[in-house]
Structure formats: C-alpha cells, structure tokens
Amino acid sequence: MTQHGLFISIEGIDGAGKSSHIEALAAAFRAQGRAVTLTREPGGTPLAEKLRTMVLNDSMDPLTEALLVFAARRDHLQQVIEPALARGDVLVCDRFTDATFAYQGGGRGFRLDVLSQLEQFVQTVSAPEADFIRNPDLTLWFELAPEIAAERLAGARVPDRFESLPTEFFRRVSDGYARRAEGSPARFARIDAAQPREAVWQQVHAVLVQRGYLEARA
C-alpha cells in the first residue's frame, strides 16, 4: 500500500535545542518502516545553501533578505520537498516559512502582507483537484525564553549575523512565532523547550502519537 508523504517542520529561536531532537525523530519513524528525508531552511539544495551563506553572513536590507530566503525556498520545494512527499517519505525540515514570518516579520519588523504574498507565490503547488499552498502537516514549535536561549548559545560557537543580535530581537521573533501559532492552531504543537532534554523528547513523541503519526510503542 502506498504511504502518503508527511511534512514536519521544527521551529524555534536560536538556542531552543530543536536540532538535537531531529535525529531522534528520524530514528523513531525509521523504526516503524518509514523512509525519512532530513533537510533544513534556508538550505537543502546546493543553490539554497549558497543563499543561506549570504543570508547568515552578508549585510542586506530586510526586503533583500526576505527575497533571498524565498528564492532558496522555491528551489528547495522543487528539488527536495515535493519529490520526497511524492515518494511517500516523512520529510523533517529544520525551519520553514514560519521562521520567515518570525525572523523577517517579527524580528526585522518587515511587512507581513508582503511575506504573505511571497508565501502564496512561491509555495503554490499545482494539483488535479485544486492548487494549494504547501505548508507542513505538523509544526513542532520549541518555545523558549530568549534569555535562556542566549545562555545556552554563549560560547557554543561563533555567532552568525542573527545569533549576534540582542535579546530584544529574539523576543520579537518569539512573538512572531506566537502569532503564526495562533493563526494555525491545528498545525502547531507547542513544545516547552525549557525542560531537560529527555522531557522535551517525551513531549515531541507524545504529540506524534496523539496525531497518529507514530505508534505508541516507538
């Protein structure tokens, strides 16, 4: 029997610890016989990774930043995301469009209406029944106070252009995520990322079981 593809995005501010659970998530699905594709944004393709390097390191205005992020996303959708879902894979993406609304919209204060237009233009998928905007089936939002995230990041690595921004920026980013969650409550699942790592994983696993994506024995 052909399995339907499943698109899961992992969201949260820098330092929330989301990346440390991606491999565990993949392992849980593989243990139940599912093929898994792991990817990230910005990035996921050779072209998108080049654009990621520019976005994270080069100085630019918010509109240029948003356009580069969506250009990377378009290539990512065409080359990785849509083919994986067509194969029936579980696709786990470290950030997707919610991050753009949180970082460029909330953090930078860029116009949400322009981001919405870009989202519709870039993410529209043609289908026999009707065209639709591709978004994840489930978004796991690792919510963490910016002050705690900053403590976790301190000395961990050389910060990029975003990680070096002040705590107030990440408060606005967190508020941006909250607005996206309020707008799509059925898609979002809030994860309390302030808990110890094992407790965070238990929350993630419980959400997947509750939604019917994983069997309880995993």
Image: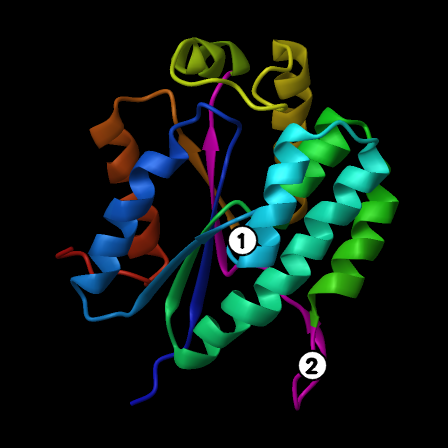
SS for callout 2 = loop
Scheme by which the image is coloured? rainbow
Q: Which residue is mark 2?
A: 126
Residue 16 percent across, percent down from the top left: 43, 26
Mark 1 or 2, which is nearer the eye?
A: 2
Q: Nearer the viewer, residue 1 or 63?
A: 63
Q: Quadrant of the C terminus?
A: bottom left
Q: Quadrant of the N terminus?
A: bottom left
Q: Residue at x 28, y 50 (%)?
A: 25
Q: Nearer the viewer, residue 213 or 68?
A: 68
Identity, as a three-letter code, of the amino acid under mark 2:
Ser
Q: Is residue 40 above or below residue 31?
A: above
Q: Is residue 94 above or below residue 200?
A: below
Identity, as a three-letter code, of the amino acid under mark 1:
Arg
Residue 169, quarter of the rendered image: top right
Left or right of 146 on screen, residue 62? right
The residue carrying pointer 2 sits among few (fewer than 14), some (14 to 19) or many (20 or more) residues within 10 Å by Cα, namely: few
Q: CA distance from mark 1 to mark 2?
A: 21 Å
Can residue 82 be seen here? yes
**Residue 59 is inside the magenta segment:** no
Q: Which residue is mark 1?
A: 187
- What stretch of residues is rendered in magenta? 125-145
- Name the N-terminal-most of marks 1 and 2: 2
